[in-house]
Image: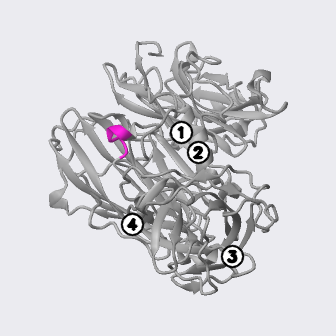
Amino acid sequence: MRPSWWKFAAGALTLLLPNMAQADGIAIRPDLLKPGEIRLDGMIKEWPTALTTLGKTISGSPGRDTAMRGTIAYDETNIYIAAEFNDEKLVRTAKCGDAEDHASLVLAFPIRGSYVQHEVDLFPGDPGKAAGCVKMRGAPVTGGKIVEAPRGVPGQYSFEAIIPWKTFPEAERVRVGLRAALRYYDGDGRSIKAIVSTSTEVPPGDLPRLAIDAEQSLEDGLLKEKRITSPPVHDKFADLFGDGMVERVAVYDRYLVVLGPRYREGREYYFTDLGVDVTAGQMPMFDVRDVNGDGKADIVLRRRIGKPGEYREILVVLSMGTSEAPFQIFQHEVGIRGPSGSISNEVRLGAKSIEILPGNVTGYTAATYREPIENQMDPLLFPWGPIRSQTYEWNGKTYIKTREDKQAPGRVVRSKARALPPPARPPTPDEMQDQVYALYKRERRVNGSEKPRFDVATDLAEDERNERVLLHGRDLVVFGKGFKGGAGYAFLTLEQFNDPSDVVDLTARDITDDGKAEIFVRGVMRSKAPKDSGLKAGTVVGREVVLVYSVGARGISRVFGAETGREIGEKRVQGALAFLPGAKGLDIEVRPGQAFGFTDRTYPFQQDRDKVGGLEPLLLPWSGGALARYHWDGTQFVR
């Protein structure tokens, strides 16, 4: 159930599809036409789609001489109808009365959980006697037109008709998720004797689907390839691009799908693997609304990483912006379920703000909570913790934390939850060791005025005094008063990186619980794509990596390395790392993440099963949700 604080923002039109019963009838697959492709002359030879028989009887007993076949097409401006019908005694007058012989298009639009239905009557002309006309609710349709032609056999006719989209108020914004039927009314001038249709008389939401070209591509592509036959778990409509026309945002099985009448010219769809088992309840919240006040709807979801019984829950906000693929603009850990209980933070979404509050707790207390603290994003808030609420506001580019309210002192209860040890800090003047630093620069021929890009101090080796660890160019350098008698240094050149700027972060923390910190290096390894990747020659692939080093008597050695992301241009696959309590210190868990701009079909690489270049493999979002966990064996992290 959606919390009571969940409100729809003004300006974001969100439409919900109700639970659909099985449509009773035959769905017509309309063609998306090019301008001028159809010439309205009553002859239907140039139509690309086969005609569908109106095989359902709504009322009366149609005679053998009463039958119709028809089809539908559309473009940006109009809907087109083509049909052939038999009626040995065509009853038509200049009045185009309801009791006369005529066809109709029944069209239903999904609006706010139900459907709005319209019926447009199509009266073919009786050649030489009465002109054709197009009406809705008894009034002529502006811009509507119908042209009939005899088929050379008495009582057999064909016609083509145009109905402008502007005939339907809803079509100004909604042209996806439609339902439709074609009907033929056999009248005698006084009453209707029989009605045949592509559907029986059902509620608007149970009419056969009228799938636009992109929806047909979805059915023929993803749904067919993945053998998905069940309806979407979530099916919503909202304006993601701010052009006034809504897109369809759906979740089929574990796949997020975006399509629309103007998105990718109305012919293609976007999809990505969410990396969670949605049908097993691993995505308890999914909605589409404007959360940053830019007039464009965003995708908001809560996804659970782990198993149904044990997981971490993350709030994620995705935006389309000017891109054709959704990208992440916010994430925050908001829940956990473990062996001893669960915690679920409360989330309040404003017009341009997101507020996180501690929410509810079951089973856990400050004394019994033993789970690790998330360090890849802002972590879960605890009912017993020092923070009462966090507020993030949109600054036009990203969300920034603008407020953090503290709990009243009497309510704060210190938790014994295990967190990562604090990171390294800048060195003090006493830790500078200028003489040893100068020795390194002289022997490595470093310009005397050159400054290190990273420079921190922590206890890495030998006695309890801190060492200084810094990055000069690509050199990782360690020295200190208690290291090598205070007279020497150790260095390691990070040859994995082509340029010093490819190293994006350096810190140090003790994760092996031996009192000595390990050095963490995060950077991007760049190389040309292999020939068998199918990519254009010379394409540069960036591999985001995390490298962990230990410092000992023999110098600096790598004890763990993993690929956590891969990028080609603006497209990327992003994984994640987590630190969990282990038998010795903390274990490292590698998790699948999200894809931005890639799908399992367009990503040019396979899931690696073994180390690549000495690095643990990146786990892809569509790899089945498997996790890889590594523990400290005394010398390195092993699986």
330 in relation to 303, above or below: below
Give the number of the disc on residue 257.
none
Of mark 4 and mark 3, the one earlier in the sequence is 4
> Is residue 325 at all visible to an observer of this figure?
no
Instruction: Give the residue number, with chain letter if any, for mark 3.
Output: 126
Which percent across, then down, holds residue 593?
50, 37
Q: Which residue is mark 1?
A: 223
Q: Residue at x 70, y 31 (%)?
A: 474
Q: Main secondary structure of the magenta part?
A: loop
Q: Secondary structure at mark 1?
A: helix
Q: CA distance from mark 4 to mark 2?
A: 23 Å
The residue at which mark 2 appears reads as 218
Q: Tell me the CA gap for discs 1 and 3.
A: 45 Å
Please tell me whether residue 217 is drawn above or below residue 555 in the rendered image: below
- Asked which secondary structure carries label 2, the reply is helix
- Between 617 and 301, the one nearer to me in the picture: 301
Q: Are marks 1 and 2 in contact (CB under 8 Å)?
A: yes
Whole-percent x, y for residue 526 in the image? 73, 32
Q: Amino acid at mark 3?
A: Asp
Mark 1 residue type? Leu
Mark 4 surroundings: few (<14), some (14-19) or many (≥20) residues within 10 A: some
Task: Determine whether, in the image, residue 540 is placed left or right of residue 361.
Answer: right
Label 4 residue SS = strand
Q: Which residues are magenta?
A: 279-283
Q: Quadrant of the C terminus?
A: top left
